[in-house]
Image: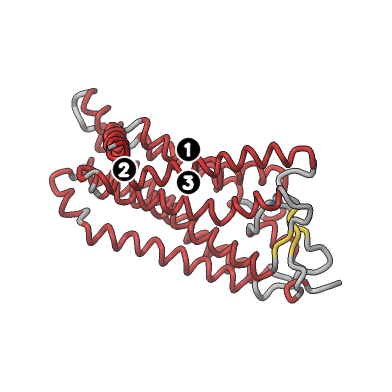
Amino acid sequence: IKNYSSSTSGFIFLGLSSNPQLEKPLFAIFLTMYLVTTVGNVLIILAIHSDSRLQTPMYFFLSNLSFMDICFTMVIVPKMLVNLQSETKTISYVGCLVQMYFFMAFGNTDSYLLASMAIDRLVAISNPFHYDVVMNPQRCVLMLLGSCTISHLHSLFWVLFLSHLSFCASHVIQHFFCDIQPVLKLSCTDTSSSQIVVMTETLAVVATPFLCILLSYMQIIITVLRIPSTAGKWKAFSTCGSHLTVVALFYGSVIYVYFRPLSMYSAVKDRVVTVMYTVVTPMLNPFIYSLRNKDMKRGMGKLRDRIHS
C-alpha cells in the first residue's frame, strides 16, 4: 500500500475510452468542439461589447457566462486532448487538486450566473417600470462578485478537504479529469463522518442557485398568466426561452452526476453525462443565445460589419 497523496507519481486517467482505436477520432471531435466553444463564446463577448444597445444587465451576465464557459472548458479539455495523444495519461497530485479547484470554481460560478439571469428576467417581467433601478450596474457587479466569491470559497473548502485524504493501492482515476466522485472512490481514508459536513456544504452552495432559478420562474409563470392577451403572454415568456434551454442542459446533467450517493457512482455513465455539461453545453450556449435572439443577431451583424470594414 502506498500513499499517493505524497507521491510524485500522481494519478493516471482511465480516459474517455479504453479502446486505443477510438483515441484519434475522439481527439478530432473534441478539438473541433473546443475550438467552436472558444470562438463562439468569444464572438458573444465581442458582439455584446461592440453594440451599445446590448449594454443591459441581461447581456452583462451573458458575456460573463460566456467568459466562464471559456475558462471552464480550458480547465478540462486541453489536458484531455493531450491525454488522448499520449500513452501515459497522468496528472500530478498537485495538478489534480488545481484542476479540481478551478473546475468547481468556474462550474459553480456558471450556475450562480444562470441564477442571476433568472432574477434579471423576473424583474424585467414582474416589475418592468423599476427594472433600471433594481438591476442597476452596481447591483449587477455585486451579483457577479458574489457569484465568484462563493464559488471560489466552495472550491477551496473541497480542495482542503481532499488534501487531507490518503490514496492507497490504486491511483487510476476512472474519468478523463479530476472530478470529486472518482477521486473520492480512490481514497482509503474513512471519510464517512466528514463527508456529511462536506456534502451538506455542497448541497447548500450548489442547490441555492438552482432553487433561486425555480422560484424565479414560478413567479414569472404567475405573472405571465395574469397577462390578458395570448400575444402578450408569448412575448413576455419568449425572452426566457434561451435561458431555460441552457438551465435544462446544465442542471439536468449536473443533478444526475452529483446528487446521488457515492455507492451509486457509475464510471461509464458518468463520463458520458459529464461530457454534456463540461463540453457540449458550453459549446451550445452561443448558438442557443444568438440563433433565438434578435438583439444578438443584430449585435453579431454589427460585429461582422466592423471586422469587414
Res. 138 image quadrant: bottom left
- Residue 266 at least partly seen: no
The residue at the point 71 percent across, 40 percent down is 24
Q: Tag 1, which secondary structure?
A: helix
Residue 26 pos. (x, y %): 68, 39
24 up-or-down from 259: above or below:
above
Out of 195 and 13, give the one closest to the viewer: 13
Q: Amino acid at mark 3?
A: Thr
46 up-or-down from 300: above or below:
below
Label 2, residues with CA under 10 Å away: few <14, some 14-19, many ≥20: many
Q: Which residue is mark 1?
A: 284
Q: Amino acid at mark 2?
A: Ala
Q: Tag 3, which secondary structure?
A: helix
Label 1, residues with CA under 10 Å away: few <14, some 14-19, many ≥20: some
Residue 77 pos. (x, y %): 59, 50
Q: Which residue is mark 3?
A: 38
142 up-or-down from 42: above or below:
below
Out of 73 and 120, give the one closest to the viewer: 73
Earlier in the chain: of badge 2 and badge 3, it is 3
The residue at the point 24 percent across, 23 percent down is 230
Q: Which residue is mark 2?
A: 47
Q: Are marks 2 and 3 in contact (CB under 8 Å)?
A: no
Earlier in the chain: of badge 2 and badge 1, it is 2
In the image, taking residue 59 as reference, residue 9 lies left or right, namely right
Residue 111 pos. (x, y %): 44, 52
How far separated are the C-alphas under marks 3 and 1? 11 Å
How far separated are the C-alphas under marks 2 and 1? 17 Å
